[in-house]
């Protein structure tokens, strides 16, 4: 069955292995199935929900675009654009915001985490962030949305918003209720320093993550310094629940090598940790280093990246204009 795919990544710099394994690698696989129509968006409007420096933001928009291309997205096969160039996103977010309920948004765990203790000081944008995300998806009648596990709750909200809009405006099935596409195994890549914390761009320690632009030496060094424990490498029957760091490293290996976790456990059972870490570094260098090099190369040609975005934006605008006109008619404008 052909799918309409939409997903977004924030241009906030430091794209890392979690972004790649949790999202971007999936984007590429979906694009390579010719039946699918794929739209991948650099969500710059979302990124300003926390303060950004204008010059750095501009660079990060290009860097995220370069990361898409370097990872294997092809602008001839997928629509690649940045959100702020299609004004329908912000307009539809307003309309959907009037359908969404305060109670729904108050339950969003990402807001609670990002706002921290002092909620009064969080931006209003950060609070309504998931409504803009719903607008992104619903505007293109997306049927499937590939995201990491952390975005599951936002997608459930998007489904609720679509259903409420259809109900309120007596338009059954008008907004398409999308399905999340979340990898079943190891969809959450954890910090290299703490197996209970998500690998994140905002972690102050650079040793906690593998950035996609890290070179060979950095990757090797970070894996060498990654946290493990004093027990031997586990076997197939060993439970890893109490060993989150080991589970995470094995998961990364399994994901990158496209092998089951049992196969990986079997391969390294009883061996020295340093042997496993050497193999893991090798695999990471093999897969990530070429992407990083390509990103750096692409960033030298800003014109080329800007052209990709401009072309994508034109295509996205054509699709979005049709849908927003229908939405406006239903609302009574
Ligand atoms: P963001 O950088 O927050 O815009 O996230 C972009 C995509 O990467 C989203 O689909 C996230 O769910 C995914 N992602 C971010 N961090 C991780 C992680 N540590 N593990 C797996 N997926 C992640
Ligand atoms: N909120 C997503 C994240 O932080 C990014 C995003 C914005 C997105 N709009 C989207 C993802 C639409 C999927 C579909 O990761």
Image: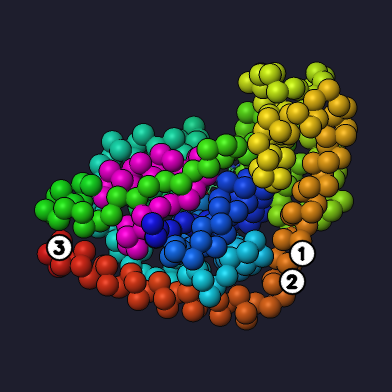
- Answer above or below: position of 7 versus 128: below
Element type at marker 1?
helix
Q: Would you place residue 110 above or below residue 291 in this image?
A: above
- Look at the image and tell me in which quarter the N terminus lies: bottom left
Which span of residues is magenta-colored? 137-162
Residue located beneath label 3 in the image = 330
**Residue under numbered circle 1:** 293
Using the rendered image of the protein, determine whether residue 10 is visible from the camera's viewpoint.
no
Per the picture, the main secondary structure of the magenta-coloured stretch is: helix
Q: Residue at x 62, y 79 (%)?
A: 304
The reply to whether dot 1 and dot 2 touch (C-beta < 8 Å) is yes
| Quadrant holding the C terminus | bottom left
Q: Give neighbour class at mark 3: few <14, some 14-19, many 20+ (Cα, 10 Å).
A: some
Pointer 2: what residue? 297
Residue 302 visible here:
yes
Local crowd at mark 2 within 10 Å, few (<14), some, or many (≥20)?
few
* In-front residue for pair 115/298: 298
Q: CA distance from mark 2 to mark 3?
A: 47 Å
**Residue 188, percent from left and from top:** 58, 38
Q: Residue at x 49, y 66 (%)?
A: 34
Q: CA distance from mark 1 to mark 3?
A: 49 Å
Q: Secondary structure at mark 2?
A: helix
Residue 307 lies in magenta, yes or no? no
Q: Does residue 189 lie above or below 306 as drawn?
A: above
> Relative to the observer, which residue lies in front, 157 or 98?
157
Q: CA distance from mark 1 to mark 2?
A: 6 Å
Q: Residue at x 43, y 52 (%)?
A: 145
Q: Quick one: SS at disc 3?
A: helix
Mark 1 surroundings within 10 Å by alpha-carbon count, few (fewer than 14), some (14 through 19), many (20 or more): some
């Amino acid at each position: 069955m052909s799918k309409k795919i939409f997903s977004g990544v924030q241009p906030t710099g430091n794209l890392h292995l979690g972004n790649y394994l949790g999202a971007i690698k999936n984007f590429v696989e979906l694009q390579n199935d010719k039946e699918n129509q794929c739209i991948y968006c650099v969500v710059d409007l979302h990124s300003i929900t926390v303060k950004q420096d204008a010059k750095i933001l501009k660079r990060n928009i290009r860097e995220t675009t370069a990361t898409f291309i370097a990872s294997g997205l092809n602008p001839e096969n997928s629509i690649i654009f940045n959100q702020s160039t299609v004004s329908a996103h912000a307009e539809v977010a307003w309309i959907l915001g009037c359908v969404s309920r305060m109670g729904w948004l108050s339950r969003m765990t990402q807001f609670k985490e990002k706002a921290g203790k002092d909620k009064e000081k969080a931006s209003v944008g950060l609070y309504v962030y998931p409504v803009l995300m719903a607008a992104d998806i619903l505007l293109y009648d997306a049927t499937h949305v590939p995201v990491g596990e952390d975005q599951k709750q936002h997608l459930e909200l998007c489904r609720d918003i679509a259903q409420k809009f259809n109900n309120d405006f007596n338009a059954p099935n008008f907004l398409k209720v999308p399905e999340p596409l979340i990898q079943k195994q190891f969809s959450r890549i954890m910090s290299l320093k703490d197996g209970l914390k998500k690998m994140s761009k905002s972690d102050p320690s650079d040793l906690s993550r593998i950035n996609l632009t890290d070179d060979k030496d950095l990757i090797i060094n970070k894996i060498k310094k990654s946290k493990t424990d004093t027990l031997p490498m586990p076997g197939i029957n060993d439970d890893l629940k109490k060993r989150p760091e080991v589970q995470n490293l094995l998961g990364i290996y399994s994901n990158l090598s496209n092998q089951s976790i049992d196969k990986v456990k079997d391969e390294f059972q009883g061996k020295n940790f340093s042997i496993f870490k050497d193999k893991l570094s090798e695999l990471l260098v093999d897969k990530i280093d070429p992407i990083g090099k390509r990103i750096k190369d692409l960033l030298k040609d800003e014109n080329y990246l800007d052209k990709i975005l401009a072309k994508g934006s034109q295509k996205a605008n054509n699709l979005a204009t049709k849908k927003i006109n229908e939405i406006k008619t239903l609302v009574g404008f």
